[in-house]
Image (cartoon, grey):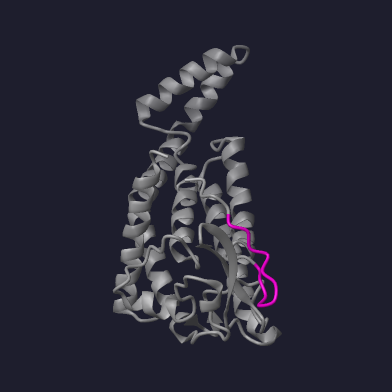
Amino acid sequence: MMAFAPWQALLDGLGWVVAQFYEFVPNYGVTIILLTIAIRVVLLPLGIRQVRSMQHMQIVQPKVKQIQQKFKGNKQRQQEETMKLYKEYGVNPFSGCWPVLLQFPILIAMYSVLRFPQHPIHIPEDSELYSVITVQIPPVASPADVPTEPGDPSGTSFLGMNLLCSATQAGNADSALGDRITVGGEAVDISYPVDCGNDAVDRIPYYVFAVLMFGTTFYQQRQMQKAQPPGAANPQQQAILKIMPIMFGVFGIFAWVPACTREHCRFKKRKPWF
């Protein structure tokens, strides 16, 4: 629980950045793209360090093989001498994993800020982005206050997609976003009707983007593997690089919002793990 307040402060700060991007370019999809680019720029020094580490690995790899041959029957001595060599040349054999692993908390933070409904909301209330979101998901005090018809999705639309909807909801005219509010000290499940399209054609952009996300992530990890000399990457690192594209693809399709309809919402509010 000690990390709860700093984490919330981080989410509020990220929400402020998102709102500022939306003020600059009032398009929710472009806002998310700009946020992604900004995060990549922040991670750029780590990426440069990773490339340099790979270059150093290529230099020391022949020496590592010499150590392996010299101490062929002594694994402990091999490790000791190899670590000395890495230290001498400033090589970190695990540096290739860090840019990948650091994407997890960043994705969690982005998900927490961009997923709606959310409590507390991390977008500043005086921002234009807050206005276009609450048109579709207004704050309510009781189930009687929930709108019966979807709000205007134009403020969160991008290339034919309402970005408040998931790929599993696209094309379903009865889609809804699940939420839980407290009424009289008791938790009550509600659902907001949301415009996610009316037919199967409306699903195409979602799946196109999911495939692009899988493909670009796979290409990126593949290039990282090719940049390393044979035997330089450890098995754990190789496993992470192979699994990441699959995880991102599944996340993009299923993990955005809970699947609901206006008549029935299978939403279950979970206590935040953070």
Q: Seen in the image, is 66 located left or right of residue 91?
A: right
Q: Nearer the viewer, residue 213 or 118?
A: 118
Report the magenta stretch's main SS: loop
Q: How many numbered circles does the render carry?
A: 0
Rendered residue at 46%/38% (across/down): 58
Q: Is residue 75 above or below residue 233?
A: above
Q: Considering only vertical position in the picture, is 135 above or below 186? A: below
Q: Residue 23 location, x and y as percent? A: 30, 77
Is 251 on the left-hand or right-hand side of 118?
right
Going 67% across and 86% down the picture, which residue do you hit?
Answer: 201
Q: From where the camera sits, is residue 215 visible?
A: no
Residue 49 falls in which quadrant of the image? top left
Residue occupying image coordinates x 58% and y 72%? 209
Where is residue 235 drawn, in percent x and y? Answer: 62, 36
Judge whether 202 appears above or below 12 on screen: below
Camera sees residue 129 = yes
Furthest toward the front, the residue is 184
**Front-most of residues 23 and 103:** 23
- Near-viewer residue (146 or 28): 146
> In this view of the protein, which residue sits in the foreground, 226 or 243?
243
Question: In this picture, which residue range is highlighted in magenta?
Answer: 259-269
Q: Judge whether residue 27 is colored magenta.
A: no
Residue 126 lies in quadrant? bottom left
Could you tell me which quadrant the N terminus lies in? top left
> How far from the left and from the top, in percent, is residue 18?
35, 68
Residue 83 image position (x, y, % from top left): 45, 22
